Amino acid sequence: MSPFRERRKMEKALSRFPWAPVCLLAIVLLLTAAVRIRLLDAPLERDEGEYAYAGQLILQGDPPYRDVYNMKMPGVYAAYALIEAAFGETPRAVHTGLLLVNALTLLLVFLLADRLAGQRAALSAAAAFAFLSLGRPVQGIFANAEHFVLPFAIGGLLLLLRSENRPGLWPVTAGGALLGIAFLMKQHGAAFVLFAGLYLLISGLRRRPWQWKALAARCALFSAGALLPFGLMCLMLWRAGVFERFWFWTFEYARQYASGLPLPDGWRNLKGEIAIMVRSAPLLWGLAGLGATALVWDRKARKQGAFVAGFTAFSFLALCPGLYFRPHYFVLLLPAVSLLAGIAAGSLADLFAACGARRLGRAVSFLAIAASILQGAYLQRNFLFFSDPIRASRATYGLNPFPESLEIARYINEHTTPQDRIAVIGSEPQIYFYARRRSATGYIYTYALMEDQPFAHTMQQEMIQEIEAARPKYLVFVNIPTSWLVGPKSITHIFQWSERYRDEFYKLAGIIDIVSGDQTLYRWDEEAIGYTPRSDFWVAVFVRRP
């Protein structure tokens, strides 16, 4: 081929490259990153503190569940360890990792929507997800485990869809493996594994003529891929000597936790959280609702209606274990909501195009998604554009001692050696991470000790024994209701014990008095003696007597 023809061929190929969608997608990514970068230094909340502390211990060579007891799956601990190894052990490092994970998820949402509904719907879905996953209603700037579930879940689903029209079985196996990793990030990821398996089976049965051997092979390979990550993880934990503790916390105790809330309370939780989210971006949620109806009246959308409806239903199912419906759980629903919003935008364009007004349809489609996002951004403008990292934390979590944990940890770090142990009587694991000091007990949360469940008394006794055996140099007592969640049936033995234990072996070293969202008073050493907190929200730091 002559150089002239070769150049013309290359120019023709480049002319077909979708530069406009790529540029628009890049703009969405950059705008999202700009907001996140501004808030990278937001102090860690409790779950982030747990994951960061567990990741810190992994980097020191300790397996999960040896020194950290909780029902979370170990995948998110490993993810945090990788982030800390790459970027450092700071809130900025953790949130930089979240920025990258969120950007990857946004790209995967775009690819999923593009495959199902076309390029226009994909761009709209990506923009909707970028905005919704930033929002305060889902605690979007904080690196909760749900963010780490999504890239593996959506990536696995994309591979399954890709395998439908292509020969070979590796995409099915790889897709199953990715979905299996999504489960390792959080138990709620099992809903996506179940959806993928059912979709694979049903789509195979709908084909004529039936190809039983091929379908059986696909299902078997998918199941093997999905189970492989869990099997390898169990083997690693067994070899590390922590499998029994892992199994107790992530399955036996987790089963008690998931069955602890009555249905009326769960319904109340769901209604309250949905109302908050819809009020924060009503046009965008309305657009998603229109997308749900388009699965019926739009012929193009109806072709993928089974997948989209199933994906939405199982995404909602992922929120339901325990019926707690915590705000960050709804991150799992956002790809489905964004996909529906994208379908609505694409269906509007197609509706006008069918009437001969193609350009008007494109304009209406663009205006619909743009107006929806701009309205939501305006309603959340103070949080997204004007809050500093501390105010963003306060706006999301109120008077929880997340900003104060930095100063508490700084004081403890300066007055201890790496060999010293500390104990936090409360649920503030971020203090261990900031202070770079090991906990005297594996009970880095006290929620389980206050729940109406059969293990509560034994857990309190075990926490007490571990603290007394370790003789921590510093003891931190957290007098904040949300650090305990004491209920009417809670066993309160640990409060009486902690008071006696402090009086016998410790002296006051500091009082942190959270007077308001804008004022915290720190009293250290001699200044703390005799100080009476002005607020009901305070933290006391005690040092062991010589």
Image (cartoon, rainbow, N blue to C red):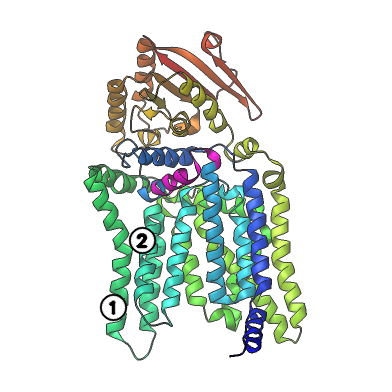
From this view, report whether residue 470 is shown above or below residue 328. Answer: above
Within 10 Å of disc 2 (Cα), the crowding (few <14, some 14-19, many 20+) is many
Q: Residue at x 56, y 51 (%)?
A: 99
Residue at the spot 69% in from the left edge and 55% down from the top edge: 376
Q: Viewer-proximal residue, 114 or 254?
A: 114
Seen at 69% across and 59% down, the residue is: 373
User: What kind of element bears circle 1?
Assistant: helix
In magenta segment, residue 80: yes
Q: Position of residue 472 (x, y in %)?
A: 35, 21
Q: Is residue 330 above or below residue 155?
A: above
Cβ atoms under marks 1 and 2 closer than 8 Å: no
Residue 285, visible in the rendered structure: no
- Determine whether, in the image, residue 149 is placed left or right of residue 349: left
Query: Where residue 217 is drawn, which disc sits there?
Result: 1
Q: Which of the labelled discs sits on residue 332, or is there none?
A: none
* Quarter residue 172 falls in: bottom left
User: Quadrant of the image for the N terminus?
Assistant: bottom right
> Mark 1 to mark 2: distance in Å?
18 Å
52 relative position to 254: left or right: right
Residue numbers of the magenta segment: 78-92
Q: Amino acid at mark 2?
A: Gly
**Sequence-first disc among 1 and 2:** 2
Residue 492, by quadrant, is: top left
Q: What type of secondary structure mainly makes up the magenta span?
A: helix
Q: Quadrant of the C terminus?
A: top left
Find residue 479 and report its horizontal and vertical position in percent: 49, 24
Instruction: Identify residue type, mark 1.
Output: Ala
Q: Which of 108/187 is in front?
A: 108
Tag count: 2
- Camera sees residue 17: yes
